[in-house]
Image (cartoon, grey):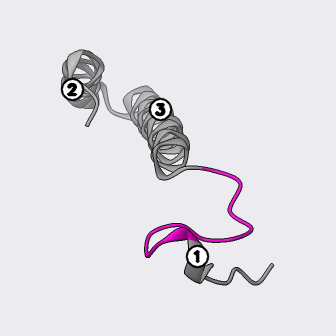
Amino acid sequence: MLVERNPASGPSELSGSRHSVSEFDAEIGAWRGKARVLYLLRTTIELAIDALHDPDQLFGFGLLLDRAVVMRGRPQR
């Protein structure tokens, strides 16, 4: 959809826009959170598979879990 600037509404408002910038920011933040969870899940699965072949990989698995706990406690931007 082509969005044109409405000259009567001021410099920052667009005609045809249905969402505010804060709504877009919230949606982007939600997608970033989902991507972070999927990344941690994928990495956890990869390390678990590696640990089946090499028990020394369990050290990396523990580090990943520590990182997940730290990231969970971080405030959102």
For the C terminus, the image quarter is top left
* Residue, far right: 1
Which residue is the extreme one toward the front? 8
What main secondary structure does the magenta stretch of the protein show?
A: loop
Question: Mark 1 vs mark 3: which is more N-terminal?
Answer: 1
- Residue 15 in the image: state x and y as whole percent: 69, 71
The residue range painted magenta reads 9-19
**Residue found 47% across the figure and 32% down from its top:** 37
Of labels 2 and 1, the one closer to you:
1
Q: Are marks 3 and 2 in contact (CB under 8 Å)?
A: no
Question: Disc 2 marks which amino acid?
Answer: Arg
Task: Report the disc number at residue 20.
Answer: none
The amino acid marked with disc number 3 is: Val
Between marks 1 and 3 in the image, the one whose residue lies nearer the viewer = 1
- Residue 70: percent from left, percent from top: 19, 20
Quadrant of the image for the N terminus?
bottom right
Q: Determine the secondary structure under disc 2.
A: helix
Q: Which label sits on residue 8?
A: 1
The quarter of the picture where residue 3 lies is bottom right
Q: Secondary structure at mark 1?
A: helix
Q: According to the image, label 3 marks what residue?
A: 37
Image disc number at residue 67: 2
Pick whichever of labels 3 and 2 is earlier in the sequence. Answer: 3
Measured Cα–Cα span from mark 1 to mark 3: 43 Å
